[in-house]
Image (cartoon, coloured by chain):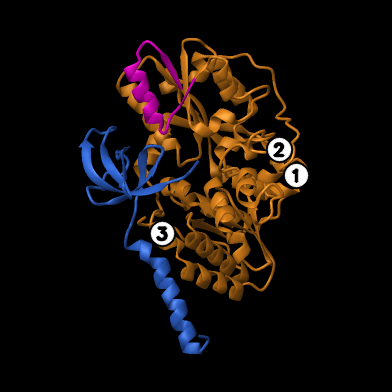
Chain colours: A blue, B orange
Amino acid sequence: MCLGIPGRIVTLTDTGVLTRSGIVDFEGVTREINLALVEAAGVGDFILAHAGIAISQINEREAQKVFEYLRSIDEAELETGDL
Amino acid sequence: MKFVDEFREADSVKRLSEQIHRSTTRPWSLMEVCGGQTHSIVRFGIDQLLPDAISLLHGPGCPVCVTSERLIDHAIAVAEDRDVVLCSFGDMLRVPGTEKDLLTARSAGAEVKVVYSPLDAVKFAVEHPEREVVFFGVGFETTAPATALAVRQAHEQGLRNFSLLCSHVLVPPAIESILSSDKASVQGFLAAGHVCAVMGWREYIPICQRFRVPIVVTGFEPIDLLHGILLCIEQLEAGRSEVENQYVRTVTEEGNRKAQDLIVDVFEVVPRHWRGIGEIGSSGLAIRDHYREFDALRRYPVDLEVCSDNTGCISGEVLIGAKKPPECPAFGAACTPEHPLGATMVSSEGACAAYYRFRGSAGQQI
């Protein structure tokens, strides 16, 4: 029910306040998504779509944090000789 | 797929699983309150990558599952009005009401249309001015902005043939209800990532403080879930109870303010009956008086007998984490996705349906 799908904005098709929309690419499948609630998101940005609207803009830099954490585990293990 | 595949990568999954094993010294019970997370946990076997000391409980995370029989009956009665086209999400069609479901009503001639978005229902109303279009709106805070946007679009366009039958529910009151219950013993929560994408995570701080439980905002992919579990276990082991955000690529502290403003503009908070659980105060959304012309409850008042939500299944106990699906005597026997006794077996995100699909009719790992 709360399934959210990440996709990349390809074009903007409507700039109305409540109807701001664009074509969003979900890894090859495209669909028109309402973008009224992610004002800062433009062409090329990734958004999270749910029930036909974008509810959040995905922060690509923050997405790396879990992998940085995993690298820090590896480094800690190397230092303690666990590996 | 970008932001999907990399969060399923096997080596990272293994590393996180190992780190959880290293961090766990005592038994802990964690609960997720999101059907999407329940589905992922069972689908990817996340629970089987954990130490035996960690128990994952599945909470009332499926809004389809907790929609009351009374509202289903109301939707069926509205759909049976010959002027009406009732639109809803596909999962809603097979949820049993007192005597039948919407799919049965459709077979008997009612016009029931499956839509992907509430905005599709508004579009259908614009294209068919001769029909009365009713959207049966269900969902948590994740879906509420789309439903609110549909009402606002209808209002702006002066649509006279669109209305909303609203069954939206809110997550924090459900968590508080579970923590106040004698039946469940949850020590930490994984908060639903997409609910928090809309609402942010500040509203969970008072719950952490009152009940002294850690709450970790968590995503949906295997790496997200394991990372969320690890953060929760680390808090429990250290005796901390804070709100922590694992799902940083999508969730910010304040959430989506524009979406929140839209929800507040269109809806007011009301008590709501949760199927299998009962009434929870301040846990539902209803249309504000300002938008009353779009309220299907007012437009189509239906006199229904009070029903008891008595379907003979134990979904109420499953929904608060007191029991797991395979513990139900009907699971996989009298109750299957083809012939569900309760809503948790109907919706693809219901805990019973997830166990049946990924663990077989006995509920065990295949």
User: Which disc is residue B171 wearing?
Assistant: none
- The quarter holding residue B259 reads top left
**Chain that bears disc 3:** B
Q: Nearer the viewer, residue B324 or B363?
A: B363
Report whether mark 1 lies on the same chain as mark 2. yes
Q: x%, y% of residue B207?
A: 57, 52
Q: Secondary structure at mark 3?
A: helix
Please name the amino acid that badge 3 sits on: Asp
Instruction: Give the number of the mark in front: 3 or 1.
Output: 3
- Considering only vertical position in the picture, is B217 above or below B59? below
**Percent x, y of residue B77:** 58, 16
Q: Using the rendered view, name the quadrant where residue B210 is placed.
A: bottom right
Residue range of the region highlighted in magenta in the rendering:
B112-134
Q: Is residue A17 visible?
A: yes
For disc 1, the chain is: B
Estimate how packed mark 1 is, as few (under 14), some (14 to 19) or many (20 or more) residues with alpha carbons within 10 Å: some
Helix, strand or loop at mark 2: loop
Earlier sequence position, callout 2 versus callout 3: 3
Name the secondary structure under disc 1: loop
What residue would you read off at disc 3? B5
Who's the residue at 67% across and 34% down the image? B340
Task: State the separation of the CA atoms marked 1 and 2.
Answer: 9 Å
| Label 2, label 3: how far apart the Cα atoms are | 34 Å
Mark linked to residue B335? 2
The disc labelled 1 sits on which kind of residue? Answer: Cys
- Which residue does the numbered mark 1 point to in the structure image? B328
At a point 69% along the width and 45% down the height, the residue shown is B318
Looking at the image, is mark 1 or mark 2 nearer the viewer? Answer: 2
Looking at the image, tell me whether mark 1 or mark 2 is earlier in sequence order: 1
